[in-house]
Amino acid sequence: MKLDVKSLVFTAVYAALCCVATMIIIVPLPNGYVNAGDVLVLLAGWCLGPYFGGISAGVGCAIADLVSGYVIYAPVTFVVKFVVAILAFYIARLFKKIIKKDSLDYISRAISAIIAQLFMVLGYFIYESILYGLVGGSLALVGNTLQGTFCAIGGTLLISVLYRIKYIRNVFPRLNSGEK
């Protein structure tokens, strides 16, 4: 992990983007909301790598919970989004080694997005089951699954477009090889 100004700046920018996407692009539900924040969480993991991506995802989404009045969710949001970004990075890296063709990069991203979003759904299910009981946790599964599905598709589509831009691959070298 190389700590430099560029990494710190991009970490802060991605944290802000995660926060804004979580707060602005929302669909309210009875005990929370569905949002587009995980699109940026996935991008943070893929573009910044596991450490800076995880930090930006966790901090940005937790701040969104704090500012939006969902304070009780901020701790679990930090942990879940941190892990989602890390999973997205490492799973994409694993599948990039298996699927070596550069034109099929979207497959490794899609697989990593699906697995990472399944972790998100599971993480919130466990937390909400602790808070609201098994029935309350089960009721939140629908919204979290919708969010995970939307964000896995959105993140995969967005990274597929961004990956084709040489400048983006130069700015975020972790996109190319999946290495740290």
Image: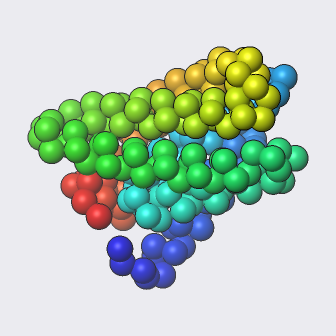
Q: How is the image coloured?
A: rainbow
Q: Position of residue 163 (x, y in %)?
A: 33, 46
Residue located at (46% from left, 76% from top): 6
Q: Work out whether residue 107 or residue 143 is closer to the camera in this orientation and state it.
A: 143
Q: Residue furthest bottom?
A: 4
* Quarter occupied by residue 17: bottom right
Q: Position of residue 118 (x, y in %)?
A: 48, 30
Q: Position of residue 150 (x, y in %)?
A: 55, 25
**How many numbered discs sit on the rendered protein?**
0
Does residue 74 appear left or right of residue 10 in this picture? right
Residue located at (21% from left, 55% from top): 177
Q: Residue furthest right?
A: 69
Image quadrant in which the N terminus is located: bottom left
Residue located at (75% from left, 41% from top): 24
Residue 161 lies, with reference to residue 82, above or below; the image says: above
Image quadrant in which the C terminus is located: bottom left
Residue located at (58% from left, 22% from top): 145
Residue 14 lies, with reference to residue 100, above or below; the image says: below
* Quarter occupied by residue 169: bottom left
Q: Position of residue 47 (x, y in %)?
A: 40, 55
Q: Work out whether residue 103 or residue 180 is closer to the camera in this orientation and state it.
A: 180
Q: Work out whether residue 36 or residue 145 is closer to the camera in this orientation and state it.
A: 145
* Quarter occupied by residue 112: top left
Does residue 124 appear left or right of residue 168 in this picture? right
Residue 157 shows in this picture = no
Residue 39 shows in this picture = yes
Does residue 58 appear left or right of residue 132 in this picture? left
